[in-house]
Amino acid sequence: MSKTEDFLTASEEQEIVQAIVAAEKDTSGEIRVHIEENSEKPPLERAQEVFLSLGMQNTKDRNGVLFYVSVSNKHFAILGDEGINRIVGSDFWNSTKDIVIDHFKNNQNKEALVKGIIEAGKRLKEFFPYQSDDTNELPNEISKG
């Protein structure tokens, strides 16, 4: 098995998807998770590539958020689209990032992502609250590369 396959069990992946569904009930923001084995690129640069390849820039309010994980080199990044970045401060993602990294350090991979996603939903709610006409613009499933 690859490190990517060992990173989360199928049931853990479903718990992460459920966390995305729960977080998106409070915000019009769209959250995705992408996990891949390895990347030679810096995590933020690779996250930007993945963000575009997943079409996350195509949301109406440009409020997509990507949790990017490169398993073998233990890289992680959170990337928000320009609609978010225009409104929030440069330190907006720090508390979410800290939660995720603290759990990753303890090999609590599922908890890292679930707690990070829930925190992101709470943070986004302030600027992008859920709207009654909100539609789920992006899939909630974990993408893998």
Image (spheres, rainbow, N blue to C red):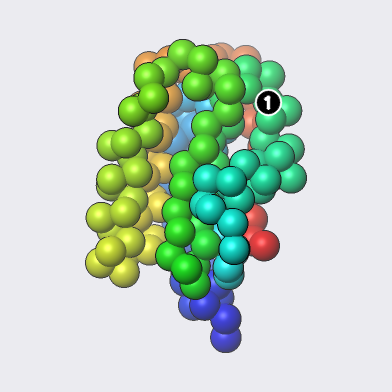
Q: Residue at 67% across / 62% down in the picture?
A: 145
Q: In which quarter of the image is residue 92?
A: top left
Residue 40 at what x, y percent from top left?
59, 63
Tell me which amino acid carries mark 1.
Thr
Query: Residue 129: horizontal and vertical position, in percent?
Result: 46, 17
Query: Is 26 or 143 nearer to us in this picture?
Result: 143
Residue under label 1: 59
Q: In which quarter of the image is the N terminus?
A: bottom right
Q: Is residue 109 left or right of residue 133?
A: left
Query: Does the rendering let one see residue 11?
Result: no
Residue at 50% in and 57% down: 69
Q: Which residue is drawn at 67% across and 35% down?
A: 56
Q: In this view, does 141 lie to the left or right of 22?
A: right
Q: In this view, does 121 lie to the left or right of 33?
A: left
Write down the quadrant of residue 103 in the picture. Answer: bottom left
The foreground one among 20 and 123 is: 123
Q: Is disc 1 placed on a helix, strand or loop?
A: loop
